[in-house]
Amino acid sequence: MIAAFVLALWTAWLGYMFVLVVCLRFFITPGKRNARLALLLLGLSLVSIVLFLLHIRWVQPDAWQELMGAFNRRLARTSGTGIKVTWAAWAGKMADTLRSQILPFSWVLGVLGTVCVIWRRKNDESLRYLGSAALCFFVLSAFYVIVFQNASYVHDYASFYFTVPLGMMGGVALEAFLRACEARRARMRTAGLAATMATCAILIFAGERQALALCAPYHILGKPNDFTPQLGHFMREKFPEGTNVICNFLPPYYGPYMQYYAQRTVLEHIFTTDEWINAVKDPEIAPVGAVIWLGKPKAKQVLAALPAGSREEIIVQGSLFCFWKPHR
């Protein structure tokens, strides 16, 4: 077991978080307290951190400063471009990620399994142990997503670790259903087995379908695959290097695709007219430019609210855009 914890520490930062959660359990759980083991794991974590810090300092003299910078950046509630994100925007992104990355039926099974564990925990020691293990993974995932808000906002995989406790509790729910069917007539047992097998098949095929959908490219405005590279080429051509670009046609949580082809920073979560006005006047994100799709409702209202500057209309695959730049 100690070797497994050491490997976890040397695999990823989440390994340290998991060890801390386990140590907390050993310190406070009634009947399961093991202060010596918890202190041993904390000591191993400390030794591992010291070795890591010495190693990176040996490789790169300023590694500690860069490490602290990266740590503070991940703690901040900002987007991938460093722009401050509101609590509502962050919560919306988390809800969208948890819905799209994990099947809704998996959440249902996880909740039902949790109810089963709570209901039967006094009479079934194995369920108490399994529930405790699932709780450790859940606390780990919640801690990572909530505390390191930049990481969870930018990287969809941050919430993937919720699949561990959901999978464990989903298995409990299916087992409880089968046990309930076994206590009845033979027909009910057969029907319960068939329903369970159908549920597993649905999860497999729905999961595969969702995975393929996530891998598929996003089509901006319903255009073909080459639309994004073409529009990105114009953005790269019209805006100088270092310009932050605002767009009115990208959906929330769009991803890095347009930014990749444009080779310019594309700012996120700027939708209303007031948000546009505040963004173009904010000295922290200057220099700034705008690409406005004129086919969107209120596009002219947004364009009229922008300060004086150069405006150039460009048609890309039949869609009319206005490229705005402030006067120097």
Image: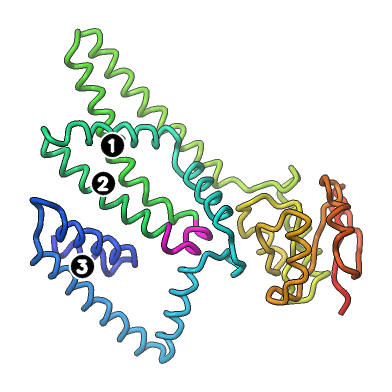
**Around disc 1, counting alpha carbons within 10 Å, would you say few (fewer than 14), some (14 to 19), or many (20 or more)?**
many
For the point 44% across and 89% down, the residue is: 62
| Residue placed under numbered mark 3 in the picture | 6
For the point 55% across and 51% down, the residue is: 93
Cα separation, mark 2 vs mark 1, equals: 9 Å
Cα separation, mark 2 vs mark 3, equals: 20 Å
Closer-to-camera residue (211/67): 67
| Residue placed under numbered mark 2 in the picture | 134
Q: Earlier in the sequence, mark 2 or mark 3?
A: 3
Q: Inspect the image, locate mark 3, and give the three-letter code of the amino acid beneath it.
A: Val
Q: Secondary structure at mark 3?
A: helix
Compared with 208, 248 (above or below) is below
* Position of residue 92 measured from the top left corner of the image (x, y, whole percent): 55, 49
In the picture, the disc for residue 114 is: 1
Q: Earlier in the sequence, mark 2 or mark 1?
A: 1
* Position of residue 33 measured from the top left corner of the image (x, y, whole percent): 10, 57
Q: Secondary structure at mark 2?
A: helix
* Position of residue 130 measured from the top left corner of the image (x, y, whole percent): 19, 43
**Is-magenta flag for residue 154?**
yes
Mark 1 and mark 2 in contact (Cβ < 8 Å)?
A: yes
Q: Inspect the image, locate mark 1, and give the three-letter code of the amino acid beneath it.
A: Thr
Quadrant assignment for the C terminus: bottom right
Closer-to-camera residue (147/44): 147
* Region of the chain picked out in magenta, as a range: 146-155
Nearer the viewer's eye, disc 3 or disc 1?
A: 1
